[in-house]
């Protein structure tokens, strides 16, 4: 059987069982995304990876690759939609790019640059959210969380710990920490956990490691995200 | 572990999918689910505490703090039109309560809740989970004194808790006499195949909105091999302005249960569930009694009507305040004790992979009732009514500005005008069809017919006369979606809030043409990119009203020049200028 699909007039072969996103990643085709990680089961919540599959708008990360699919990805109209989704994520939280410890290594910021996002474009919501700095090695700033649930899934699937869950609904949705006190220091989280590494933004961060790389040497300083890939899926141990 | 929690856990056999039911039982007993209780439940079910907290905080009728009186005012636009805001203000004032917070003595809590299905007898509220209808200033005054005197709910005036049926027009479904077991006997005599053919002949479609042919759904489920099949009745009637399922469950429960039992025989199910919205708890006891009567009659339980190969029973699961659970994928998540997030998008559809991964028929209350009555009256009488593509009749919930609100059964294809005449509505500005997620109809469209070929309807029609400001309606709908978005995907979670803010800006007269353009962009994105139907339809009322009432929007704008910014520079800087004046 001919396992080939076509993204923006480029033919790509795939293995059966792969999603469109997995096939694209393997072939080096960039589809913008935030809640997808190659080692974690996909769930399709950020909606950045929406592509036109034979005329239907579908998330690339949860749609199976099928032979003969004609997929539009890097088009002006799809990127305009993605800019709007990215703007939504920016105004929903408090994303303090210039001062953020994650700046230069942040996938939200990098996707925004890739999409040519130059201004918030929407009214800021200025949420009132907390910071959990109780853990010796890890900081959780809820203001910068984009609810991608990568930490929830990584802790469950990779660390076998279930440290996180989602609580609340709608605008009140937030990460819940599994501890009677509800605080990180009383949870089973360790700095070695994959759940900490997979955060694409400045929400879950390792302490004592901020601002170590000078501007110019950070992950996305030299090349944009479509060339560098995801900061959170690079080999562990490689300093970003 | 507290004795009560231990017994609730034991009653539910420590089954993890019973989590939501366990939490509801605990709250009904203790008025809340304290953090301590949540920890005990987590331990008892071998779940993480965070997961239990996630479930408690998802459902708006569950709460972690104790109170003696929990009052939730229905916040649908129809309740507002009948004076809800002033009544709630009045009660807050009398009891010295801040909205959404338990009073400092820990006794009283008052908040808003989404439509509780009483638009024909609004304004209404839930008190400790039980429905109180037709609120008036004198009832509010009396209520305040009952609360301050710590009178238990069981001693409150019984007539407050009466829910009227308000059936205004009956036809084939509501008017044909039906004896429990009648359709079931017919099916057992004629056989499954002939039963399916009869349903096909009647061309029944699902009444939940999608209109999927009933016989095809049941056949698909029947043909899927599995270790178990399930029947689920979707009684999560959360669409604001809809209440026809309430009337069916209250006055015709045998029809509904009989339809479920027919389905069970056909697909080979042994277990059925009614997912009853938490707001309809008041009818739980009477539904349980009806189930017991049917067991006593041999219409439920082992060897139904003496058939050795036919055992089936029905459990009632309660919801707890989440509109999204009316969507079948979210409903099944909730039935399994999870947050009602429609995580898995079909395909596969529940009909092949539903409850516990097994093939599951999910149908609306009305659909099950129709299936029983169809086998009862036969194909000829059924197909005589309706249109070519929509056979039979439809129940309509009519509320708002009309003299006779209530439930109307009309043959499909009836014109909107005929319906408006029947409910004695005049001076109509517009109708909202199928709730906030539906579309509005102006009087110039009233010759159109209600059927799937023309105006598709879930059965809800809210009537607004010329005195009602359009922005009050759209703003109420926008608030509803903000409250009900599950928060899973970005377009719906953030988009619903942005639309609400922009509508507010428009109604306050601060908006410009740029805001309208931005609203349209956001609406388009939500329609095309949301994860589920809630987000895809949450902006319908905005794009639709913009299209049908452009002049109303234009007249509200502060500035219609598209080249001007969306804020008023003079106004924004006026305070700073005033302060810097010497």
Image: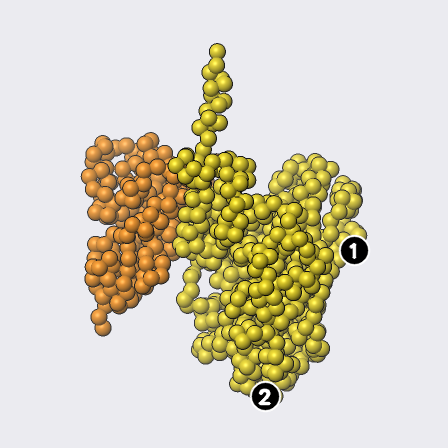
Say which residue appears at 57% left-offset and 45% top-offset.
Answer: B471
As displayed, is residue B40 above or below residue B236?
above
Using a 10 Å C-alpha cutoff, classify the residue at mark 2 as few (fewer than 14 neighbours), some (14 to 19) or many (20 or more).
few
Q: Is residue A140 visible?
A: no
- Mark 1 — residue? B159
Way the structure is coloured: by chain
Mark 1, secondary structure of its residue: helix
Locate residue B240 relative to residue B282 in the image: left or right. Answer: left
Say which residue appears at 42% left-offset and 64% top-offset.
Answer: B346
Say which residue appears at 29% left-offset and 42% top-offset.
Answer: A116
Q: Residue furthest front?
A: B444
Locate residue A221 relative to residue B252 in the image: left or right. Answer: left
For mark 2, name the chain: B
Tint applied to chain B in the drawing: yellow
Q: x, y (%) of residue B37? A: 58, 49
- Mark 2 — residue? B190
As displayed, is residue B332 above or below residue B301?
above
Mark pair 1, 2: CA separation: 46 Å
The orange-coloured chain is labelled A
């Amino acid at each position: 059987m001919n396992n080939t699909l076509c993204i923006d007039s480029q033919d790509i072969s795939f293995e059966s069982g792969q999603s469109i996103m997995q096939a694209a990643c393997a072939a080096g085709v960039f589809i913008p995304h935030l809640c997808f990680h190659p080692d974690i089961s996909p769930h399709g919540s950020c909606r950045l990876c929406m592509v036109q599959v034979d005329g239907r708008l579908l998330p690339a990360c949860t749609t199976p690759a099928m032979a003969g699919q004609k997929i539009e990805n890097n088009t002006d109209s799809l990127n305009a939609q993605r800019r709007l989704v990215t703007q939504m994520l920016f105004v929903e939280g408090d994303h303090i790019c210039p001062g953020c410890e994650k700046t230069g290594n942040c996938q939200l910021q990098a996707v925004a640059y890739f999409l040519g996002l130059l201004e918030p474009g929407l009214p800021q919501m200025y949420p009132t959210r907390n910071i959990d700095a109780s853990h010796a090695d890890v900081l959780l700033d809820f203001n910068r969380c984009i609810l991608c649930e990568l930490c929830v899934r990584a802790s469950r699937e990779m660390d076998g710990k279930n440290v996180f869950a989602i609580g609340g609904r709608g605008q009140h949705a937030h990460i819940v920490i599994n501890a009677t006190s509800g605080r990180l220091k009383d949870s089973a989280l360790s700095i070695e956990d994959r759940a900490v590494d997979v955060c694409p933004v400045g929400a879950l961060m390792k302490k004592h490691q901020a601002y170590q790389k000078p501007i110019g040497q950070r992950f996305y300083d030299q090349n944009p995200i479509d060339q560098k890939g995801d900061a959170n899926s690079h080999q562990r141990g490689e300093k970003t | 572990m507290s004795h009560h929690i231990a017994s609730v856990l034991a009653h539910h056999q420590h089954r993890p999918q019973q989590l939501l039911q366990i939490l509801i039982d605990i709250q009904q007993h203790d008025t809340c689910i304290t953090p301590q209780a949540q920890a005990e439940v987590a331990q008892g079910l071998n779940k993480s505490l965070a997961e239990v907290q996630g479930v408690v905080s998802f459902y708006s009728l569950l709460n972690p703090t104790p109170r003696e009186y929990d009052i939730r005012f229905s916040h649908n636009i129809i309740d507002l039109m009948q004076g809800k805001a002033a009544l709630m203000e009045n009660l807050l004032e009398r009891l010295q309560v801040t909205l959404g917070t338990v009073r400092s003595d820990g006794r009283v809590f008052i908040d808003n809740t989404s439509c509780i299905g009483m638009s024909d007898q609004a304004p209404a509220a839930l008190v400790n989970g039980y429905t109180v209808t037709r609120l008036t200033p004198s009832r509010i005054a009396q209520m305040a004194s009952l609360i301050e005197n710590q009178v238990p709910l069981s001693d409150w005036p019984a007539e407050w808790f009466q829910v009227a049926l308000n059936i205004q027009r009956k036809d084939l479904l509501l008017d044909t006499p039906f004896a429990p077991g009648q359709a079931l006997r017919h099916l057992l005599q004629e056989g499954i195949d002939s039963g399916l053919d009869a349903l096909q002949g009647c061309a029944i479609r699902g009444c939940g909105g999608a209109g999927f042919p009933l016989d095809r759904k049941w056949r698909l489920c029947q043909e899927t091999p599995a270790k178990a099949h399930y029947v689920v009745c979707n009684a999560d009637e959360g669409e604001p302005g809809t209440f026809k399922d309430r009337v069916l469950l209250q006055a015709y429960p045998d029809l509904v249960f009989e339809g479920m039992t027919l389905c069970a025989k056909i697909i080979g199910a042994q277990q059925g569930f009614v997912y009853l919205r938490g707001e309809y708890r008041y009818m739980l006891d009477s539904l349980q009694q009806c189930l017991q009567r049917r067991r006593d009659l041999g219409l439920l339980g082992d060897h139904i009507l003496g058939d050795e190969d036919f055992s089936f029973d029905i459990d009632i699961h309660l919801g707890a305040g989440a509109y999204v659970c009316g969507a079948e994928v979210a409903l099944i998540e909730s039935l399994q004790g999870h947050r009602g997030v429609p995580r898995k998008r079909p395909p596969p559809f529940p009909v092949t992979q539903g409850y516990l991964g097994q093939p599951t028929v999910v149908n609306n209350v009305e659909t099950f009732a129709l299936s029983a009555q169809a086998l009862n009256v036969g194909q000829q009488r059924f197909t005589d009514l309706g249109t070519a593509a929509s056979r039979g009749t439809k129940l309509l919930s009519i509320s708002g500005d009309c003299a006779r609100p209530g439930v109307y059964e009309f043959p499909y294809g009836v014109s909107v005008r005929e319906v408006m005449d029947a409910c004695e509505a005049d001076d109509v500005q517009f109708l909202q069809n199928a709730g906030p997620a539906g579309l509005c109809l102006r009087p110039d469209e009233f010759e159109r017919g209600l059927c799937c070929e023309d105006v598709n309807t879930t059965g809800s029609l809210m009537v607004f006369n010329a005195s009602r400001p359009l922005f009050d309606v759209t703003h109420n709908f926008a608030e509803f979606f903000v409250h009900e978005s599950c928060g899973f995907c970005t377009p719906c979670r953030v988009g619903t809030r942005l639309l609400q803010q922009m509508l507010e800006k428009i109604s306050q007269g601060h908006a410009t043409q740029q805001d309208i353009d931005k609203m349209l962009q956001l609406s388009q994105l939500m329609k095309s990119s949301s994860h589920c139907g809630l987000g895809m339809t949450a902006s319908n009322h905005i794009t639709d009203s913009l299209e049908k009432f452009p002049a109303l929007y234009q007249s509200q704008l502060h500035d219609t020049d598209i080249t001007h910014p969306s804020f008023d520079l003079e106004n924004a800087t006026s305070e700073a200028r005033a302060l810097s004046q010497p």
